[in-house]
């Protein structure tokens, strides 16, 4: 074949075959590679290109295959353009980054992060400097921008960072809800079901983009996109796209998602580091075991973390709702927590009038005698919604928080649950940070509800025990459609929402919904498995004390001894939305949990030999009309275990 014909065929293939993005491809052909970085094991390669017109792009390959196609870099500030006309000033030498840290609120208690780092220094047409910091670890990539010259207020109006996929890529994404919609105008709060196995380019049905973490499968490689190191100078971001391409770009918060009188765009008056853009890359095992979401978060700011104690909590509201926030009901739930050896009891909305501060003091003293700590609910307040639940308006200012938190500390209260936030604008993100900072001074644990994704905050602020940011069990009590979808929804979460950040799903309804007309479609063993499968610094269980009386003693014993945090994790098998089987270690014991979210039965073959344990205790659904079936196995003799999970069923196994 003649060379000219070969060139013509190659050009046509580039223009048409690669996503149909002709203009982008032509620019790529004209661009010059200015940097390359490899992961420590050389499996992931990053290339950075600069076009003749000064536009930046990056590309990521895994094992020589494009995972992220050429994608845009840069930001636009008010009065400063860092998207084109850029000139390369300096490229650093690759540097090995090593960080080790301890946590009680993650997949692992001791984490080692290793990555190779490269910094590109560039200047725009005004000769203002922008650095881009790239990192590659064996499980993914990350990048962020640095502006060292800022002294006065500067505002970023658009971030041009994007993630371009091959058009054959599939996606598992949760739509971002529109600001000021939903119950009492409380959205967005990351509470939608996931669209699963959809084509890239599918437009969000709610027209507001997609939330993090966002899951993709391209060329048999899985990709999970999120962000970390979000501070009060930036807004929380999301992914936005249109149906014309497979490009997902960084989108900013809605202008309505703000603290009263505050702004929504990123703003800073000193040298600026933007949040990390995180791209986890590998197999589903990589996704389920990765800790990139906390690896890239700043180190803990607390010197004394002795008051930070993970645990489990009883919670009346999920069962008996608003009318039973009473002294006697809460006392019953304190007794329940004590009996189950759970560390906390959460008292929900309107406690300030239905019980009152004086009687709360009495309950707190009673709970202390039972070795149970009280957690109290608050309305985040402000004018961002019309919700009337209270206490409200007491946390809006530094002075108000200090007064209230001091009072709670004197009462012996251990933590607070703050609800109904108003989105991801910069000023609202600053509000979250202010609450965390002030709560730490009074040694109060924090649970954000009706809230944004934590994005690794639990590493920086270890007293952030959990956050909702999920369509959780409480929605199953309101809507039969949510109950119908629960099994499938739960099988999504280890690969998405709960991949990095603690999640207040409020799981484990073993015996049925006591205050609802909805019929639970999952089995008791499925619900029991969630106690191991889902991660939360404080796990609020959706089980009533009356229902727990029906639970066999051996299952109660399991729940009394269930660890409060984990030392290690192993992904055994699964698929987003269909099923998940994960093992977690505490000390010398391994806890295996599996759920089937599919409509069909699932056969499993669990390898017991790799755990090197002698005894296995298995809990499954009973076939004899009881809640559970218990089987004790000799794991030394029985190397593998065949299990069949019916639709909406699950199992738990303890190996020791």
Image: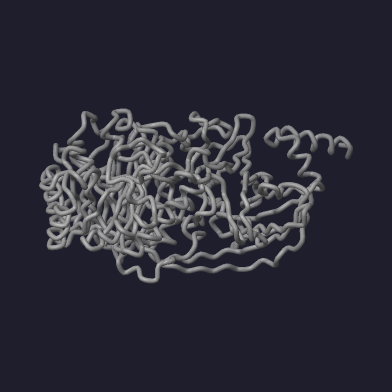
The x, y position of residue 290, in whole percent, is 47, 56
Q: Nearer the viewer, residue 109 or 73?
A: 73
Q: Is residue 26 left or right of residue 438?
A: right
Q: Is residue 639 left or right of residue 139?
A: left
Q: Is residue 516 left or right of residue 275?
A: left
At horizontal 45% and vertical 56% (from top left) the residue drawn is 456
The residue lying furthest to the bottom in this view is 303
Q: Nearer the viewer, residue 151 or 121?
A: 151
Give above or below for 312 relative to 521. below
Picture quadrant where residue 186 is located: top left
- Quarter of the picture holding the C terminus: bottom left
The x, y position of residue 359, in whole percent, is 14, 52
The x, y position of residue 78, in whole percent, is 66, 47
Q: Is residue 379 left or right of residue 428?
A: left
Picture quadrant where residue 326 is located: top left
Rendering colour mode: one colour
Residue 330 shows in the view: yes
Residue 637 shows in the view: no
Give above or below for 650 relative to 312. above
Give above or below for 361 relative to 201. below
Q: Nearer the viewer, residue 346 or 64?
A: 346
Count the marks: how many?
0
- Quarter of the picture holding the N terminus: top right
The x, y position of residue 590, in whole percent, is 31, 59
Give above or below for 607 relative to 170. below
């Amino acid at each position: 074949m003649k060379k000219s014909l070969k060139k013509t065929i190659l050009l046509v293939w580039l223009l048409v075959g690669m996503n149909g993005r002709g203009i982008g491809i032509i620019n790529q052909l004209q661009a010059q590679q200015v940097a390359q970085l490899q992961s420590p094991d050389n499996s992931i390669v990053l290339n950075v290109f600069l076009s003749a017109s000064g536009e930046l792009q990056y590309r990521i390959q895994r094992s020589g295959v494009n995972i992220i196609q050429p994608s845009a870099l840069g930001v636009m500030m008010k009065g400063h353009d860092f998207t084109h006309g850029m000139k390369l000033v300096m490229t650093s030498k690759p540097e090995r980054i090593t960080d080790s840290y301890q946590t009680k609120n993650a997949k692992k208690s001791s984490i080692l992060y290793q990555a190779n780092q490269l910094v590109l220094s560039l200047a725009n047409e005004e000769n203002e400097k922008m650095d881009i910091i790239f990192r590659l670890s064996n499980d993914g990539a990350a990048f962020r921008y640095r502006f060292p010259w800022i002294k006065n207020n500067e505002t970023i109006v658009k971030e041009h960072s994007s993630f371009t996929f091959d058009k054959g890529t599939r996606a598992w994404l949760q739509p971002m809800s529109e600001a000021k919609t939903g119950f009492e105008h409380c959205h967005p709060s990351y509470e939608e079901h996931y669209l699963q196995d959809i084509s890239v380019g599918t437009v969000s049905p709610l027209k507001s983009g997609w939330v993090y973490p966002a899951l993709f499968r391209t060329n048999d490689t899985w990709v999970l996109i999120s962000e970390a190191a979000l501070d009060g100078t930036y807004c929380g971001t999301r992914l936005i796209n249109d149906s014309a391409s497979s490009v997902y770009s960084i989108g900013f918060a809605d202008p309505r998602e703000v603290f009263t009188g505050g702004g929504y765009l990123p703003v800073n008056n000193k040298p600026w580091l933007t949040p990390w853009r995180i791209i986890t890359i590998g197999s589903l095992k990589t996704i389920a075991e990765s800790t990139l979401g906390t690896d890239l978060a700043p180190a803990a700011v607390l010197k004394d973390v002795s008051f930070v104690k993970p645990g489990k909590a009883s919670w009346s509201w999920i069962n008996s709702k608003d009318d039973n926030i009473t002294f006697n009901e809460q006392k019953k739930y304190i007794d329940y927590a004590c009996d189950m050896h759970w560390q906390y009891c959460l008292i929900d909305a309107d406690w300030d009038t239905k019980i009152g501060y004086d009687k709360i003091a009495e309950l707190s003293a009673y709970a202390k005698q039972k070795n149970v700590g009280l957690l109290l609910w608050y309305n985040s307040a402000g004018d961002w919604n019309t919700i009337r639940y209270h206490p409200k308006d007491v946390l809006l200012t530094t002075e108000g928080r200090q007064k209230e938190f001091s009072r709670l500390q004197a009462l012996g209260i251990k933590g607070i649950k703050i609800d109904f936030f108003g989105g991801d604008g910069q000023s609202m993100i600053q509000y979250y940070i202010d609450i965390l900072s002030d709560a730490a001074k009074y040694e109060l644990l924090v649970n954000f509800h009706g809230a944004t994704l934590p994005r690794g905050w639990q590493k920086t602020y270890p007293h952030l025990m959990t956050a909702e940011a999920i369509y959780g069990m409480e929605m199953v009590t309101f809507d039969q459609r949510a109950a119908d979808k629960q099994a499938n929804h739960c099988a999504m979460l280890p690969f998405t929402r709960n991949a990095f950040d603690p999640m207040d799903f409020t799981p484990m309804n073993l015996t049925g919904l006591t205050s609802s007309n909805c019929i639970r479609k999952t089995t008791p063993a499925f619900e029991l498995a969630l106690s191991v499968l889902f991660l939360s610094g404080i796990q609020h269980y959706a089980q009533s004390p009356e229902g727990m009386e029906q639970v066999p003693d051996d299952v109660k014993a399991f729940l009394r001894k269930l660890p409060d945090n984990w030392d290690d994790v192993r992904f055994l098998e699964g698929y987003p939305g269909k099923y998940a089987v994960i093992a977690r270690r505490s000390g010398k014991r391994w806890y295996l949990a599996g759920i089937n979210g599919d409509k069909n039965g699932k056969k499993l073959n669990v390898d017991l030999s790799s755990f090197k344990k002698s005894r296995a205790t298995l809990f499954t659904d009973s076939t004899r009309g009881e809640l559970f079936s218990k089987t004790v196995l000799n794991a030394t003799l029985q190397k593998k275990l065949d299990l069949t999970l019916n639709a909406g069923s699950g199992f738990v196994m303890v190996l020791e």
